[in-house]
Image (cartoon, rainbow, N blue to C red):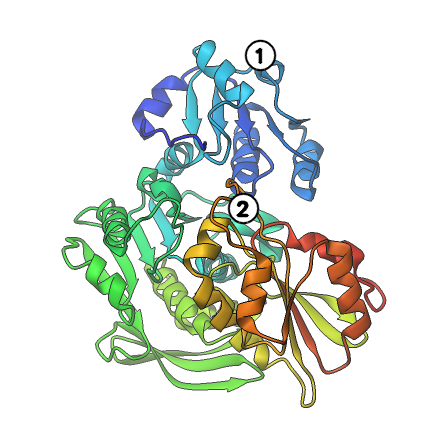
Amino acid sequence: MATENTHFGAKEISKALNNCESIFFIGIGGINMSSLAHICKRRGMRVGGSDRARTALTDKLEKEGIAVYYGHSADNVSGYGAVVYTVAISSDNPEYLYAGKMGLPCFSRADFLGYIMTGYKRRIGISGMHGKSTCTSMCAQALIEGGAEPTVLSGAELPVMGGAYTLGREENFVFEACEYMDSFLDFNPNVAVVLNIEMDHVDYFKSMEQIRRSYASFSDITGKDGYTVYNADDSEVVKALESYGGNRITFGIDSRDAYYRAENISSCKGRYSFDAYEDDCFLCRVSLSVTGYHNVYNALACIAVCRLAGLDGDKIASGLSHFCGASRRMELKGQISGADVYDDYGHHPTEVRATLSGARGLVEDGGRLICVFQPHTYSRTSALLDDFADALTIADKIIVADIYAARETDSLGVSSEILASMIGEKATAVSGFDNIAEIINNHAQSKDAVVVMGAGDIYKVFDYLNFDGEQK
């Protein structure tokens, strides 16, 4: 069973950490947890933490002088003054239990992040069921290139940041606001961005009404002097924000009264260009370097954020044109027999559909779109099975890996074999990364595009792929 979020708030955490010189992170290898650990280290604290296995992120932590323990033991926490944990750990985690026994201040990741951000003037939370990491990364790229020197905490690594976070001035703090278990309600944004809303995280959210309430509460945190930047084309978003009392900034493509709009949209090989309008006035021409129609919406949200931060249209357009994607968001990994191979984090039918539709534009005449897909959690796969099957049919050949269990056990009778059978003859369920790689190595051809997709550990398949020359 997962642990619960704490809800102490910034003031109480500040009091609890008064004179505290050391902090321990349970689950330090996570993208957000590792970023918070780096921030605390740079603020002068002694930092340590634990996780299940060594990764590139834990290697980076150790290079910065942060102690990382592999495996969980109460002894690891000895000597530390406070604990931050991810709710992904179980409630019987020995380090978590030890912290409680010893009376150490103990905070969930979301609660602690809410405390960290309070020292910033403009706190910009990027929320939505899909696109959070990409939009956060777009904002980071544009703000950094535009000279705004933001502090950013993202869910994906970005070359311009050299990782998943960057420390800048105390003017703008841009952060990814995750809705799972209502974590984002512990944050303190005065600018809330809502990209989209639909059913997901079915192990926590039981209805669309519950989801709408959560997003409404997230926006309400901004207060009457704050802003909510939201997608006017998304009916669920509009419905969720009906009673919002702060300042509204809308963006959209179809909504003619949206404050930021995209017009004269064109595409080339899946990459879109458009004229950005601000309150019916032309602002700039944007040419995106990432694929997918959905990224027009992400770019419009980014434009709204950057305008609040004072950037002019030309600087924003330049930053967006240089944005080539965040880590694991249609990230080009190399070629196999001349076929481009991409890594993508998509794990919801809407994301799968949008990503594969964009990837269609990367397939040369006579080539095929090949997708390796790893379903993420039994609950999501079971609840959205029909939608997954429909979305995956966009590809010409689909390899369905074993379901990544994450925090769950198999109690729903769903399987990768069932999903593959629903897709039809062009889909095959395959166990083992080595076996999946063998299929790709033997069948990828010039003019093909291969997309390896999923939020679990499907990226490990790259270790078995025979890339042409050096892997990116």
Q: Residue furthest bottom?
A: 365
**Closer to the camera in the image, 426 or 367:** 426
Q: Is residue 218 above or below residue 14?
A: below
At numbered mark 1, what does the secondary structure look like: helix, strand or loop?
loop
Q: Disc 1, disc 2: CB below 8 Å?
A: no
At numbered mark 2, what does the secondary structure look like: helix, strand or loop?
strand
Find disc 2 in the rendering and name its residue. 166
Q: Is residue 400 above or below residue 68?
A: below
Q: Residue at x 36, y 29 (%)?
A: 6
For residue 407, side relative to residue 183 (left or right): right
Q: Give neighbour class at mark 1: few <14, some 14-19, many 20+ (Cα, 10 Å).
A: few
Give the percent coordinates (x, y) of residue 439.
77, 67
Give the percent coordinates (x, y) of residue 20.
47, 16
Residue 79: mark:
1
The amino acid at mark 1 is: Gly
Which one is in front in this view, the residue at disc 1 or the one at disc 2? 1
Q: Residue at x 36, y 51 (%)?
A: 124
Give the percent coordinates (x, y) of residue 27.
56, 32
Asked whether residue 318 appears in the rendered view, the answer is no
The amino acid at mark 2 is: Thr
Snapshot quadrant of residue 328 = bottom right
